[in-house]
């Protein structure tokens, strides 16, 4: 089965080619089958490879499939090749699985859109690029996928390019990601040249990580920080998060695809994949953790005052990505990937649920114009509610297990700190508040729906609700692969990922297993922290989440006038948060306008004056010389004869003078 790993990215590529080149000829019905089927076949192939991998002992769960030589130049040799190991196959399962349900949902959601065929072509291309990113066996191919998802995000965010807001959002995503990608490129080049000094001219993961010990601490710190800059752009972390909320201009299934299973998870995956390098750079790990937790709480606060249901979910995504970076930043790589997986389930469901609400309300996004929808669209309500419980970290659902693991590692890991745990725990309570605020405003209370819309509110068709139900089931059971030992679980996901995220050679078990697993294996102590303390911290995190839910209930169900009163009392603070701390405006002044002025200055001062001036000046000079010279071209034979005589006399005088003086 490992030999057919190339089929996983091939199926979406075929879907893209068929829909992109022949979609109009094939027709809408054929496109509706080709798009989802391509991803479904990739998902099925990933499942088969996954079970084949499980049959092997942990020490042998590593396989490379070389497709063909790509770049061969002197000592440098790289290939188009795919790598199968626990991390890559888990990512492939998440990407293809969640994307498959999003494709099915899209058949119903986008059915009447005139760009239907183009939409599915872009969607297939997006998944193809993401699969290249997560399955690549070298940095260069991973970077192709990295740039590919950036291109596809531009195409899909600006899908309705007739709207200025959509085209501007697409451009914003593209430009901001280029800033991060510049850092990623520099990190990759520095890694290549640094290893090249030791005669290792390669970018293959196995070679790079096996020889990483040849790098000094300063160099590996610089490499990992530069790579993390790329991750900040792709995964929307401070300061490069500003593109993600604007990405809501794309179709809602696109928001689900970008925010749940594909593009934004690329940065977290990259850090986990490069765990060998990051484990050698404590400063870089600290930066990752601090940026992650700062992003988590900062963007969670913005979610308090947003009224656009998709914008609330967008800031929620940025906040949850901060949790993932906190996990990998404290060395709990498997915990970060675990939360990446569970987040794909419930965040994909939340966006698709928001799309179902929009479908029922003729595209309405403002939660102030919703309310009392739970009985009119019950499937959407219950699935959305389950996803909200999961993201809030309520026990028994997937989000509880993965989020609690990150919180515990932030507290107990050697790279963790009490302050990191405290900020992350507060952010968890804030998440519970603004997510239940969205639930209460949308589905409870009195109806605030426009009368012209209210009379035709209806549940979405089955092709949209079935994916909601499946993702809701995964949002419940998805976390049980990582039940901590303190609760009597086996923590299977940590054991499964252990051969990859420990920092030594592929295929070998590592010391960097989860802290909890180590504690119970050694008799119940976790690096000096008892199981009782872990249970206490777990209870505290749940209580904080319940407090957040309680405040949301108080503000939006029990006393709905309270938010308005507080907003009037704290006008300055409310305006600050409502306007997202004016970060976009600050960036506009500091970077956009200043760079625009620089560009205009270079255009008018250098391009127009120097470049064009030089070219135009040469043209003018040649024109003047030509105007002088053409006066001697009279067309009269006697003038030419006279010129010849004059020329001959000049030569005669020259030779006579030369003879006299020399």
Image (spheres, helix red, strand yellow):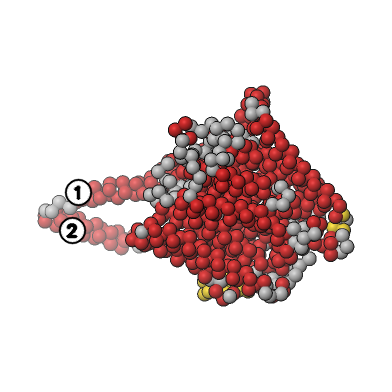
Q: Nearer the viewer, mark 2 or mark 1?
A: 1
Q: Nearer the viewer, residue 36 or 304?
A: 36
Classify residue 182 by image quadrant: bottom right
Q: Nearer the viewer, residue 562 or 470?
A: 470
From the top left corner, tell me how far across and down residue 354 is, in percent: 54, 44
On screen, residue 582 above or below 123: above
SS of the residue under disc 1: helix
From the top left corner, tell me how far across and down residue 308 is, in percent: 55, 38
| Residue 286 visible at all | no
Q: Nearer the viewer, residue 5 or 233?
A: 5
For the N terminus, the image quarter is bottom right
Residue at 55 percent of width and 61 percent of height: 96
For the C terminus, the image quarter is bottom left
Residue at 51 percent of width and 62 percent of height: 39
Q: Which residue is mark 2?
A: 644
From the top left corner, tell me how far across and down residue 56 is, in percent: 68, 75
SS of the residue under disc 2: helix
Crowding at dot 2, Cα within 10 Å, few <14 / some 14-19 / many 20+, comes out as few
Q: Which residue is outermost to the left?
A: 637
Side (left or right) of 54 relative to 529: left
Q: Which residue is outermost to the front?
A: 375
Q: Which residue is mark 1?
A: 631
Q: CA distance from mark 2 to mark 1?
A: 16 Å
Q: What is the tally of numbered marks visible in this picture?
A: 2
- Give me the disc on residue 326: none
Side (left or right) of 568 relative to 152: right
């Amino acid at each position: 089965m490992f030999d057919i790993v190339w089929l996983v990215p091939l199926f979406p590529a075929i879907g893209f080619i068929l829909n992109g080149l022949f979609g109009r000829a094939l027709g809408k019905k054929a496109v509706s089958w080709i798009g989802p089927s391509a991803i479904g076949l990739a998902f099925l192939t990933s499942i088969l490879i996954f079970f084949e991998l499980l049959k092997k002992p942990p020490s042998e769960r590593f396989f490379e499939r070389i497709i063909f030589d790509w770049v061969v130049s002197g000592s440098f040799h790289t290939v188009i090749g795919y790598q199968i190991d626990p991390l890559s196959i888990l990512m492939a399962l998440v990407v293809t699985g969640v994307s498959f349900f999003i494709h099915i949902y899209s058949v119903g959601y986008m059915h009447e859109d005139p760009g239907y065929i183009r939409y599915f072509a872009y969607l297939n291309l997006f998944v193809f690029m993401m699969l290249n990113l997560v399955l690549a066996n070298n940095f260069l191919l991973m970077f192709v996928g990295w740039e590919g998802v950036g291109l596809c995000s531009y195409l899909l965010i600006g899908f309705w390019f007739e709207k200025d807001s959509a085209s501007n959002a697409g451009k914003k995503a593209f430009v901001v990601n280029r800033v991060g990608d510049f850092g990623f490129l520099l990190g990759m080049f520095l890694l290549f040249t640094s290893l090249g000094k030791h005669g290792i001219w390669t970018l293959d993961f196995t070679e790079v990580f096996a020889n990483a010990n040849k790098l000094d601490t300063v160099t590996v710190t610089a490499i990992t920080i530069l790579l993390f800059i790329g991750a900040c752009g792709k995964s929307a972390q401070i300061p490069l998060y500003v593109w993600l909320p604007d990405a809501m201009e794309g179709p809602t299934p696109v928001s689900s695809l970008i925010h749940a299973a594909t593009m934004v998870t690329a940065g977290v995956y990259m850090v986990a994949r490069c765990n060998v390098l990051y484990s050698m750079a404590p400063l870089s790990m600290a930066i990752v953790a601090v940026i992650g937790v700062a992003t988590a709480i900062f963007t969670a606060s913005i979610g308090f005052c947003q009224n656009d249901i998709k914008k609330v979910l967008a800031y929620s995504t940025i906040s949850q990505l901060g949790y993932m970076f906190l996990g990998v930043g404290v060395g709990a790589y498997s915990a970060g990937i675990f939360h990446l997986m569970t987040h794909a389930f419930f965040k994909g469901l939340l966006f698709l649920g928001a799309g179902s609400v929009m479908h029922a309300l003729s595209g309405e996004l403002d939660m102030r114009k919703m309310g009392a929808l739970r009985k009119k669209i019950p499937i959407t309500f219950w699935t959305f509610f389950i996803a909200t419980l999961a993201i809030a970290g309520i026990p028994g659902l997937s989000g509880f297990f993965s989020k609690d693991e990150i919180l515990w590692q932030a507290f107990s890991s050697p790279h963790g700190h009490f302050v990191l745990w405290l900020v992350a725990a507060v952010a968890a309570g804030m998440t519970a508040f603004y997510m239940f605020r969205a639930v209460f405003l949308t589905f409870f209370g009195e109806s605030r729906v426009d009368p012209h819309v209210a009379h035709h509110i209806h549940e979405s068709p089955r092709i949209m609700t079935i994916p909601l139900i499946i993702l809701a089931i995964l949002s419940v059971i998805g976390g049980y692969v990582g039940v901590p030992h303190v609760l009597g679980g086996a923590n299977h996901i940590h054991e499964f990922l252990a051969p990859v995220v420990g920092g030594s050679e592929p295929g070998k078990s590592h010391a960097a297993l989860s802290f909890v697993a180590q504690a119970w294996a050694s008799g119940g102590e976790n690096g000096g922290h008892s199981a009782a303390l872990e249970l206490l911290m777990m209870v505290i995190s749940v209580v904080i989440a319940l407090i957040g839910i309680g405040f949301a209930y108080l503000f939006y169900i029990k006393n709905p006038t309270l938010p308005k009163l507080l907003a009037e009392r704290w006008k300055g603070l409310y305006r600050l948060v409502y306007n997202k701390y004016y970060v976009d405006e600050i960036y506009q002044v500091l970077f956009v306008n200043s760079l625009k002025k620089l560009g205009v200055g270079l255009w008018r001062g250098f391009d127009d004056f120097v470049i064009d001036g030089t070219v135009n000046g040469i043209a003018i000079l040649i024109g003047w010389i030509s105007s002088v010279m053409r006066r001697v071209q009279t067309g009269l034979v006697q003038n030419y004869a006279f010129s010849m005589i004059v020329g001959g006399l000049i030569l005669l005088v020259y030779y006579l003078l030369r003879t006299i003086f020399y």
